[in-house]
């Protein structure tokens, strides 16, 4: 599959078929994540693969709690009808955990460690593209409380849960998402 086609055609999926995903396929997706660039080649990511339904239920309950909180704080009415059923129905969820100590020289900057987060985001993008190339759909999910997710997944306090990637085969087709014109998002300094 052409890389540019994959980047353009990959879609976020919130409706998954109940079909399981074999470990070889999940392994290929995880390996794609490890090919991402990182500061000082620190490779600050760790992955937790979740297929246990009871754990998915706990993650979903936490997501619902956070959704209600976000609705109250933001006033965004669309959150009231935003369904988190995909957290229960996705055959696989991959938690992406970052290690702030594996960030690079920015560990010592005034703004603090951010490189590890960018590296984990690159790993996440690689995994999304790999999933699409393997005939799967995915979703990048971040509406969770880090402390609660640490407790659910047994993550040590020194590490940062950054995202959940929901994986599976989609129910139906997913329409394209509009993109703003590149001219609106680009500045050239010459």
Image (cartoon, helix red, strand yellow):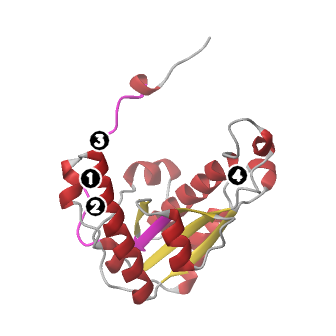
Q: Is residue 42 left or right of residue 63?
A: right
Are the residues flagged by discs 3 and 4 in contact, CB closer than 8 Å?
no
> How far separated are the C-alphas under marks 3 and 4?
28 Å
User: Could you tell me if residue 180 is visible in this image?
Assistant: yes
Q: Is residue 102 above or below residue 17?
A: above
In this picture, which residue range is highlighted in magenta? 164-182
Question: SS for tag 4?
Answer: loop
Would you say the residues marked 2 and 1 are in contact, meaning their CB atoms lie under 8 Å apart?
A: yes
Residue pictured at 50% horizontal, 78% vertical: 152
The CA distance from mark 2 to mark 3 is 27 Å
Q: Mark 2 = which residue? A: 68
* Contact check, label 2 and label 3, Cβ < 8 Å: no
The picture places residue 98, in percent across and down from the top left corner, at: 65, 61
Secondary structure of the residue carrying numbered label 2: helix
| 90 is higher (above) or lower (below) than 138 | below
Mark closer to the chain start, 2 or 3: 2
Residue 178: within the magenta?
A: yes
Alpha carbon distance from label 2 to label 1: 6 Å
Above or below, comparing residue 21 to residue 164 in the picture: below
| Between 179 and 77, the one nearer to me in the picture | 77
Cα distance in 3D space between marks 1 and 4: 38 Å
Q: Which mark is residue 178?
A: 3
Name the disc covering residue 55, or none.
Answer: none
Q: Is residue 176 visible?
A: no
Q: Mark number for residue 72?
A: 1
Q: Bin the neighbour count of mark 1 within 10 Å (Cα to Cα): few under 14, some 14-19, many 20 and up.
A: few
């Amino acid at each position: 599959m052409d890389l540019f086609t994959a980047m353009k055609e990959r879609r976020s999926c919130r409706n998954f078929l109940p079909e399981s995903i074999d470990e070889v396929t999940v392994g290929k997706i995880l390996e794609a994540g490890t090919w991402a660039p990182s500061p000082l080649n620190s490779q600050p990511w760790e992955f937790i693969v979740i297929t246990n339904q009871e754990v998915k239920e706990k993650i979903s309950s936490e997501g619902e709690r956070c959704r209600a909180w976000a609705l109250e704080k933001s006033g965004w009415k669309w959150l009231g009808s935003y369904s988190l059923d995909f957290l229960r129905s996705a055959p696989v969820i991959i938690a992406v955990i970052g290690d702030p100590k594996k960030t690079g020289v920015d560990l010592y900057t005034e703004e603090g460690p951010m490189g590890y987060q960018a590296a984990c985001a690159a790993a996440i993008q690689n995994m999304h593209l790999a999933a699409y190339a393997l005939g799967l759909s995915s979703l990048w999910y971040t509406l969770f409380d880090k402390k609660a997710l640490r407790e659910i997944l047994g993550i040590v306090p020194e590490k940062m849960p950054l995202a959940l990637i929901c994986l599976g085969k989609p129910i139906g087709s997913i329409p394209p998402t509009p993109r703003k014109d590149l001219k609106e998002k680009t500045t050239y300094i010459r």
